[in-house]
Image: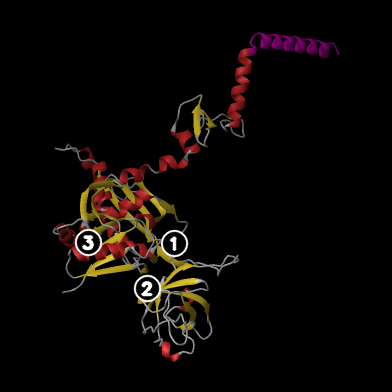
Amino acid sequence: MKKLVKSVKIAWKAVKKTVKWVREHRVFVLTVVITLLLMLLTGCIGGDGVATVALAAVVVPGVEGGKHVVDGPLTTDVTREEAPDLLLNEIDREIVKIRPMATPIDQLSRHAGSRHAGSMVVDYYNVDTKPTSAKTTRLYDEDDVPDPGRVTLYTEQDRIFDVSDTILVKGVKGYEADGVTQTDQELVLYVMGRDDVSGGILVEPVNGKLTTKSPNSVPTLPQGTVLIRMGRAATELDVMSPQFEALPQKAQNFCQIFKMQIEQSTLQRLSNKEVGWSLSDQEEAAVYDMRLGMEKSFLFGKKARVWDPVKKENIMLTGGIWSQAGKEFGYTALSGDVIVDMMRTAFTGNAGSKRKVLIGGSGLISALNKQDYTKVITAGESVAKWGIDFTELRSKFGTLYVLMSEVFDECGRADDGIIIDPEYLQKYTHVPFSTESLNLKASGVRNVDATVLTEASCLVLRYPKAHVRVVKAAE
């Protein structure tokens, strides 16, 4: 009992000394406690109570959702924890600096950014625009109908017209209010109904002609007359309108695994050289060669699976954007009028951007350079975009950024080209561009330093009709 009382007295004296020390050094103790709490809140102390150095600094949120590092330096550990995508893109940023003019398609896709693909098979959707015109499939004769003031017209695509649509009849003149005098304005029709069973659309004229059967008649329309869909016209009491729906169309492409391996023997590395030629220099040359190969695949590749009987594996080949383009413009010889027509094809009927990229072979670019441009089509100064120096070609329709690509020459298409809308060029990446060092010495394969470059990716055109193949016709 005496021993117990003595132990309690000793413990009490120790507590009193500790309390006295804490009072005397309360500022230091408070600082330590706050630091430990901050470390716990920021994850610097693990679940087992062991402090780590992963986040030695404190990260606080900014006003607009950003992050700021306080009470410590910004390290790669902090960056990888708080902004994991920041350092991962460094490889891609270095790649785009390696001879970008030689691989413009690959360059554009890398600057635009890529989407991660969770599979080697990429499914994506395209949304097209609703057709704006249709041709009549039958002759309409005003003398063969009892009431030419309300008639049924049969077209190639009746379903693109809805009740309350207005229609412009191309090439057919309308009439003044008296129904006798023709005007320069074309005939306009109003859609009253549509027969989805028997076919045809029921229309009445807005500026029709005067006949014995009706004061406002639809004049005779030959077969093949173009009807252009315009805006809808509702009444004052209309609340609803015929519905509009757009269903995307599913498409698919394969990611292709692109690889390049660089090796340098140990003796080669140790030997004296007249110039500094290291493994890094070989890697840069290899990246350029790899990008050239990818450029050709991205342009003219064929989507397919190929069985390798030796490796007993399927090889995925990506489909190129050349076959994905939704329009084609053919020419025999370039002239000012032909260039205007090419620009018209590129910038109309697709609701795309007014600035697009024309990449072509040396024959096409040579023919463009030989033209005498006018106020309608003008050749502008050089412009730097996406790390590439383009030449501007401007028209009333839009602006083309023009660049010559030797890939077209190498693939036998020196006189051809492709017009791309960068807004609708999408890259999908299953395996981002990466480098991996192989330890072939330890495995007993070869006494070399080896590096493998790898990327699994593909390109798709999200809106095919915004892109045009430019093809020279065979003479």
Residue appearing at x 86%, y 13% in the figure: 1
Asked where in the image residue 39 lies, by quadrant, the reply is top right
Farthest-out residue, front: 178
| Circle nearer the viewer, 1 or 2 | 2
Q: Is residue 51 above or below residue 238?
A: above
Residue 250 horizontal/vertical position (percent): 46, 67
Region rendered in magenta: 1-26
Of labels 1 and 3, earlier in sequence is 1
Residue at disc 2, secondary structure: strand
Query: Quarter holding the C terminus?
Result: bottom left
> In 3D space, how far apart are the residues under numbered discs 1 and 3 (Cα atoms)?
26 Å
> In 3D space, how far apart are the residues under numbered discs 3 and 2 (Cα atoms)?
45 Å
Task: Give the residue type that dot 2 points to.
Answer: Glu
Q: Which of 309 and 419 is in front in this view?
A: 419
Residue at disc 1, secondary structure: strand
> In 3D space, how far apart are the residues under numbered discs 1 and 2 (Cα atoms)?
47 Å
Of labels 3 and 2, earlier in sequence is 2
Task: Give the residue type that dot 1 points to.
Answer: Val
Q: In this view, does 246 lie above or below 40?
A: below
Residue 58 horizontal/vertical position (percent): 53, 28
Q: Name the residue under label 2.
A: 186
Farthest-out residue, bottom: 144
Please say whether residue 178 is one of the residues in the magenta stretch. no
Q: Which of 177 and 33 is in front in this view?
A: 177
Residue 442 horizontal/vertical position (percent): 35, 45
Q: Mark 3 points at which residue?
A: 408
| Circle nearer the viewer, 1 or 3 | 3
Q: Name the residue under label 1.
A: 122
Residue at disc 3, secondary structure: helix
Q: In this view, does 328 lie above or below 374?
A: below
Query: Relative to residue 80, is residue 409 drawn left or right?
Result: left
